[in-house]
Amino acid sequence: MHGSPSSGSHPNKVFASASALAPPPNPRDTLPMFKWLFGKGEDASPATGGNAEVVVVSRRVPVSREQAFAAFVDHFDAWWPRERRLAGGAIAIDGRYLGAVREAGETIGAVLSFQRPEHIVIAWQIGPGGKHESSEGSASRIDVRFVAIDANTTEVVVVHRDFARHGDGWQGYRAEMGGKSGWPALIEAYARTLG
């Protein structure tokens, strides 16, 4: 019989996998695996890693996870550098699922996942050479996790991925964002606003 249970098992008995019974992983426990997976060093600040298609930066900040998340999302305009803006105008993240990222009223991103104070994913509609992407389908993804190390320390891990969605020139854009003036400088600008 095709798909019959192995010898010694009861055909009507359902077994739950161990993972189905286990509680979800603690983000603190998964951080070392995440660092290993994306090539992030342990002691650098900010730490940069990734591969040919992904940029990963992380930075410990001396505030609670809630404060770190609020500074990144709710006060985006306070730390995102003017020279990184399309028109130099005010920039804001509408902090909710399917919210928009706007600069001077123009949509430059979409919030694809929003879990305050742990996680946000943005479809980033700014491409190579500062080109505005018309849809989130042609946008890279910025995935940010806020991992509480203790009550007053948070590891902020930024993964900028899916650069190929931008089309021609994506490799140069990935190199730019992984370079010294890209995410390493951005995460430092963010950290400075936290004191």
Image (cartoon, grey):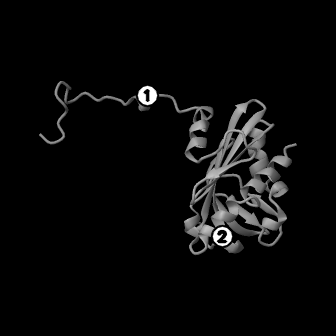
Q: Is residue 22 above or below residue 82?
A: above
> For residue 127, which numbered disc appears in the image?
2
Residue 177 at least partly seen:
yes
Q: Please give the name of the residue rendered at 78% of the width and 67% of the height, measured from the top-left corner.
A: 85
Q: Helix, strand, or loop for circle 2?
A: loop
Left or right: where 83 falls relative to 59: right
> For residue 72, which numbered disc appears in the image?
none
Residue tagged 1: 21
User: Label 1 neighbourhood size at 10 Å, few (<14), some (14-19), many (20+)?
Assistant: few
Residue 135 at least partly seen:
no
Q: Please give the name of the residue rendered at 31% of the width and 28% of the height, measured from the top-left corner.
A: 15
Q: Helix, strand, or loop for circle 1?
A: helix
Tell me how far mark 1 sits from mark 2, CA to CA: 42 Å
Q: Please give the name of the residue rendered at 74% of the width and 54% of the height, measured from the top-left corner.
A: 184
Q: Quadrant of residue 128?
A: bottom right
Q: Quadrant of residue 116?
A: top right
- Which quadrant does the N terminus fall into? top left
Where residue 22 appears, as percent x and y from the top left, is 47, 28
Where residue 32 appears, as percent x and y from the top left, is 60, 36
Q: Is residue 23 above or below residue 146?
A: above
Where residue 99 appears, as percent x and y from the top left, is 66, 58
Q: Residue furthest right?
A: 195
Q: Is residue 151 above or below residue 156?
A: above
Q: Amino acid at mark 2?
A: Gly
Q: Residue furthest top?
A: 8
Q: Please give the name of the residue rendered at 75% of the width and 29% of the height, measured from the top-left corner.
A: 151
